[in-house]
Amino acid sequence: MNPSTTPSHSSDEIEGSVQGHRDGHGFVIRDDGQSDIFLPPNEMRAVLHKDRVRARIVRQDRRGRPEGRVVEIVERPAQPIIGRLLQESGVWIVAPEDKRYGQDILIPGGALALAKPGQVVVVELTEPPALFGQPVGRITEVLGEVDDPGMEIEIAVRKYGVPHEFSEDCLAEAGALPDKVRAQDKKQRIDLTDVPLVTIDGEDARDFDDAVYCEPAKVGRSKGWRLLVAIADVSHYVQTGSAIDIDAYDRATSVYFPRRVIPMLPEKLSNGLCSLNPEVERLCMVCDMLVTAKGEVHAYQFYPAVMFSHARFTYTEVAAILANTRGPEAAKRQERVPDLLNLHDVYRALLLARRERGAVDFETTETQIVCDENGRIEKIVPRTRNDAHKLIEEAMLAANVCSADFIAQGKQHGLFRVHEGPTPEKQDTLRNYLKAMAVGLSISENPQPSEFQAIAEATKDRPDAQQIHTMLLRSMQQAIYTPINSGHFGLAFDAYTHFTSPIRRYPDLLVHRVIKAILGNTKYRLPMLPTPGEAHAKLSKRLASRVAPPGKVPRKKESGAALAETQAWEAAGLHCSANERRADEASRDVEAWLKCKYMREHLGEEYGGVVSSATGFGIFVTLDAMYVEGLVHITELGGEYFKFDEARQELRGERSGIRYAIGARVRVQVSRVDLDGRRIDFRLVNEGEQLAARPARDKGGVTAGPGKRRPAPEADAPPERGASSHRKGSGKSTQKAALLSKAPVASGKGKAGGKTAKAKGRASRRS
């Protein structure tokens, strides 16, 4: 029976979403959060990946999984499918790029839209699949040839539903904005144009949303610093509910790909009017802080201002100046060197405070893909992190904490950046692992971030330090945006939010609006926001299944208008969090595609590498030379039985006792690259083994994708930044605003909460 014709349902039927698998079977991801239901290939013939269905469990399969039968298709979401147009025996078909769609789509001759064989196209379904019939569709867009530069990005933005074209109303509204700051824009703002604020960013940055300045100051009777963090005042130009605002909310974040950015705001704003470019006046919101010698923010205040960036620095340049104040870089920037030294001093004080409160601070390696003019990978290199990166991050962290405190004291709704501690299940896994590895330290029933940092410090010199630190990171949850503050576990803050990147993150724009409302003694109200999409629904289900940690204070009961307002803010936070995940997934997909294409050039070659994770089906290995990860399947490990030890997170040979754990060094050969599956396969090379050289290039297969990579515990959007110039500064501010608000005091007991112990220094701009 065709499931779509079965209208009846009973209490033993379960609703959920279909998730296809490239091998032909699938699963029903249950709405109630319980174990997925396995769908054999014959059940997948009449349904598609992402369909919402009602299913009934009919048996347990041989692996003990619940196996189901689809009894009704509840909803078939409108979903464009991307694939390659092929002609087989005179019949036109599109082979989906996403292999979770288990069937090719038939294309009638009149629905080809001038597409040519082999081209990448977008298809809209006109007839759904049936038990004895393939789905039928029509081509709505021709993306181009599979090898066209940037094709992997065109595929990803459609595959993940990333908005990539601004509406006509949005562009018209942006076009009507002025090209520079006008006299009327400066009213009721503090004039900071004489303060030598500077931007410090990456070489390739194009939009600058933060500038900094520091000078020594007395804090009581002790020495300290006055630290100014000036952030682009996007909220002055993007009005609540405007066409630009609606498009910005829909995107929620800028999306970063190698060589291309899909911005949250039109270019006129992101690279022009809002960007704190050098030697031009710009509107900004300032967090003006007094910082003690111990790195504590003694007092702060927020105010709107007009500024003039006195220099555009790069991280590399600032690091060189700090390392040698008499070197050639410093000679070119003599007027600014004392200011940079002040910034470095306040950074060291803020770092002391970070260590004092026990914030999680692991060193991990991030990589950067370097492409040529045609978009092909030239090399993959580690991102080097220096004091300039860390200096900016600590300054941004301080401003973000002050903004969270200001909103809390103002008793208004806003979006906090909440990072909760490990779930009870992850805590148990970590305790068992630490015990099995004889670490000698463990975590308490209600762990604090300082406990994680203590374990990291105690094990940093062990040969298996990388393995232990990886497990510490994996035990944590992902950070989310929510109006319900429960602290930031990884950073050990009682309250934290995102204030410093309104050009590229919508939550920061909302925070700016709330701060302005508090300053003006008004109340900010969210506009009517568009209906959340699929990413929102997925994250909502995942969060609903979270178990509240022990000791968590229950939420106070609300009703009526107060409850409706909280729910509206919760929906906005969920939307922003989900679209942040969507941006991360799309970026990883493109990186994986590029890495696969790159590794096809190296088939048959041998490399040294390190085991980056162990699973029941094999080990993932990251190559030393290329920072690319691939799978050594368990069948490639030798002719014996290997058992996965969950406590130790390792595979162990029962006969030989050989162990493969995170951090183990191995030598591998690149044996296979599956572009469609975004997968790279290795085989182990034993000492002294002679391997037949394989062709350096795989000529066959469709150009589709790169090496598979696990998401980092918290993948906040990569920083964007860039432009250059410099002008002499005229000294100190002539209008020093009084420091009014008492500063927040970090407790050092990061509240039980969510996820991110990022790499050292990914903190402020990304935590």
Image (cartoon, rainbow, N blue to C red):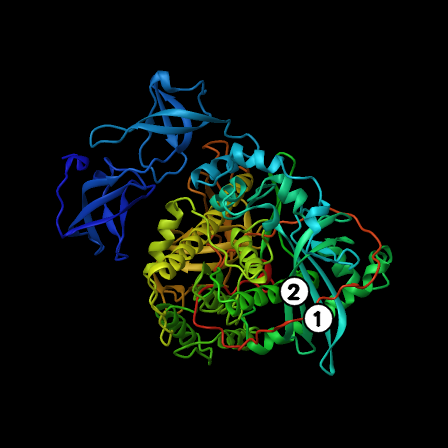
Of residues 690 and 664, which is closer to you in this image?
Answer: 664
Is residue 638 shown to the viewer in this render? no
Of residues 658 and 709, which is closer to you in this image?
Answer: 709
Q: Mark 1 is on which residue type?
A: Val
Of residues 445 and 119, which is closer to you in this image?
Answer: 445
Measured as percent of width and height from the top left, residue 336 is found at 81, 60
Q: How many numbered discs, if any?
A: 2
Q: Secondary structure at mark 1?
A: helix
Mark 2 nearby-residue class (10 Å; few <14, some 14–19, many ≥20): many
Q: Secondary structure at mark 2?
A: helix
Q: Which residue is mark 2?
A: 395
Q: Earlier in the sequence, mark 2 or mark 1?
A: 1
Measured as percent of width and height from the top left, residue 98 is found at 39, 38
Q: Which residue is mark 1?
A: 346
Given contact means CB atoms under 8 Å apart, are the residues at marks 2 and 1 in contact? yes
Q: Residue at x 54, y 37 (%)?
A: 170
Q: Quadrant of the N terminus?
A: top left
Depicted 767 relative to depicted 745: above or below: above
Measured as percent of width and height from the top left, residue 93 is found at 35, 24
Quarter of image, res 46 = top left
- Mark 2 vs mark 1, CA separation in Å: 9 Å
